[in-house]
Image: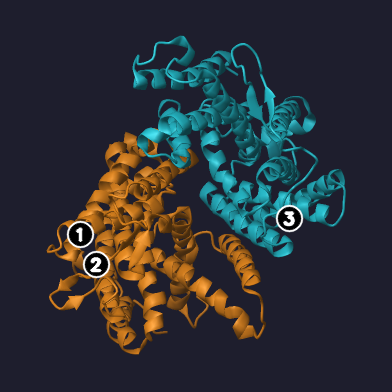
Chain colours: A cyan, B orange
Amino acid sequence: MNIRLVVICVVSALLAFPIIGFALQGLAALNPDTLFFAWDFYAEVMVKGLLQGVMYALVALGFVLIFKASGIFNFAQGAMVLFAALAMVGFMEAGLHWILAFLLAGGIMILVAVLIERVVLRPLVNQPHIILFMATIGIFFVLDGVGQTIWGSNVKAMDIGISQTPVAVFQGNLLPNGILLTPTEIIAAVVGALMVGVLAILFQYTKIGRALRAVADDHQAALSVGIPLKTIWTIVWSVAGLVALVAGVMWGSSLGVQFSLSLIALKALPVLILGGFTSIPGAIVGGLIIGASEQVGEVFVGPLVGGAIQDWFAYMLAMLVLLFRPQGLFGERIIERV
Amino acid sequence: MFYREAGQFKASYAADQAIYPIRQDKVGILILLLLAVVAVPLVAPTYWLNSIFIPFLIFSLAALGLNILTGYCGQLSLGTGGFMACGAFFSFKLTTAFPDVNIVIVFLLAGLGTALVGILFGLPSLRIKGFYLAVATLAAQFFLIWMFNKFDWWTNFSPSGVISAPPRDVIPGVTVTGSSATPEAKYLFLLVLVSLLALVAKNLVRSRTGRSWMAIRDMDIAAEIIGIRPMLAKLTAFAVSSFYIGIAGALWAFTYTGSVEALAFDINRSFEVLFMIIIGGLGSIMGSFMGAAFIVLLPIFLDQLPALLGITMSVELVAHLRFVIFGALIIFFLIVEPHGLARLWQLAKEKLRLWPFPY
């Protein structure tokens, strides 16, 4: 991991917008208190964006896990988030405590992973990647349909005891009013950081992790040294399912559980290509960069071009980065052989 | 028994290079065209023309365009919806600004405009490959839709953001666009246009250009080494593909729906067209048509299914089950025949050659 690169990326992303804003506004207001815009407002937008970025990263992590281990671009990750959240809310509505519901939903996600491996992946071994990609779009439709058939399509509240009242943090001399954040956002950030740590340890130091990395490197070679490919795939999809469940809980408790949850996958894609398809820390750093620049872009640049640029801003940013680093910031260098 | 090529000799290079070298195929396609031109408009009810044949032809054209890019040149694109919107809005602006220009020329110009946009968004393909490119093309999808939605200059400042196709004649007296056009006129116009464009595409992919696309698809570095310019090949593929998709989008807005807003060309449209070429067959002109037919007919069939089976279900449940069946069918198709319906058709022809003998 290139630490210097991480630092440069984060710092430049943080600095880019004040600089652009400064250039745009000229030196109109040189009064340091209101130096081209209110700094506490900028900090608030920035922090909101960073936390939003962690939420994106939670979804992007699921993509990375599956891509790393099988080279499949799993479009169904968003549907898995929705499905997991629906399952959990379903259990909670049946009167279970949310921890129990969480565990049961986790079990269901593992079951889903086993089914996917059995029914979809195994017959499609050795097919080109685009076919597998299409198959995951098929899974997307099935999961969406099944989830909504069983649990209905109404918006459901997911109440796991986190209050939604904003609290002020970072109060100090620089920011007299602090930054208003909801506990959900803070908890999501903590959970996201924890998850990256756990996954990094899982990948780096455990036997399963070594097997996963071997499979990611070369299916054939992994098979020939006795790594059970099918088991590994089931494990990877289960882990991705559990990551989806966590993402579902976080998104569900801030937005409510509804169909649009399956579309947040589209928000996670720029995060994914920015960070690189194959890097777990990349998902987090990509999420932070995308989340922060998206928010700041929307608030400070958006009004200049008519607003609502959130839809495509992240994609354009990711595309620009790709032009200079085609494998994303932390992705493995793409080496081509003829 | 009847599908034999024995005794049919090719005496010239032209005969050898024919699109349909076997006489039975020639007769077959002629009968098919005759049926499409004569029988369909005479026999088919208006509902069939409006909700099956017209969308089928338009989607075939879009699938053809995407197939050129993805099937022949190997560049995965998820921006189809955005390019369709380009075609629709460009032709709307053109035809409202110059009402006297023939609508066919307007469509072609809109296609050319979309081709330019396609080249612009194809530029990253020179550096980015595979799924990274697919995600990058999503930038085109979201940006274009946002642009058409946000700036009401594109809709001539219509307060609702919806464009309505004005009535236009292709030859004096025959209106083919807008609400006053008869379904038969629209259908025949589409049939001629789509057939001609399909013929052009078929010949294009057999030409030097098409072969360079396929070389890039199969292995870009090797293609570069044998002297194919990747930049030219990739950008022409993006241009030609966007040209077709743009015209399809224009036809969608002008002949199928009549009035359309930018959000009608959202990402689902892109996926729909991608499904068509995967199910029809990547790298096959015929497959684009088969895939389009499949995807257009499937939802209609699924909607009728509960009534046919005599089951009454709530509308919501039907919609959800439709999702499930649609997804399951796609997975099923990919498992059974990953090379699509075109490959099945080819296998059937091989079998037919020997039938009724085992070998």
Chain of the residue on which disc 1 is drawn: B
**How busy is the neighbourhood of tag 3: few (under 14 within 10 Å), some, or many (20 plus)?**
some
Query: Within 10 Å of the Cα at label 1, are there few (<14), some (14-19), or many (20+) other Cα atoms?
Result: few
Q: Which residue is mark 3?
A: A115
CA gap between label 3 and label 2 equals: 52 Å
> Which quadrant of the figure has residue B316?
bottom right
Q: What's under tag 1, amino acid-wise?
A: Thr
Task: From this view, report whether residue A151 is shown above or below residue B11.
Answer: above
The answer to whether residue A337 of the structure is visible from this angle is no
Chain letter behind tag 2: B
Q: Nearer the viewer, mark 3 or mark 1?
A: 1
In the picture, the disc for residue B166 is 2
Residue at image mark 1: B96
Q: Residue at x 27, y 40 (%)?
A: B232
Q: Residue at x 63, y 24 (%)?
A: A179
Q: Secondary structure at mark 2?
A: loop
Q: Is residue B189 visible?
A: yes
Q: Position of residue B338 (x, y in %)?
A: 53, 59
The quadrant holding residue A160 is: top right
Residue at disc 1, secondary structure: helix
Where is B321 relative to A237, above or below?
Answer: below
Residue A246: x and y in percent read 73, 40
Does the CB distance between marks 2 and 1 fall below 8 Å?
yes
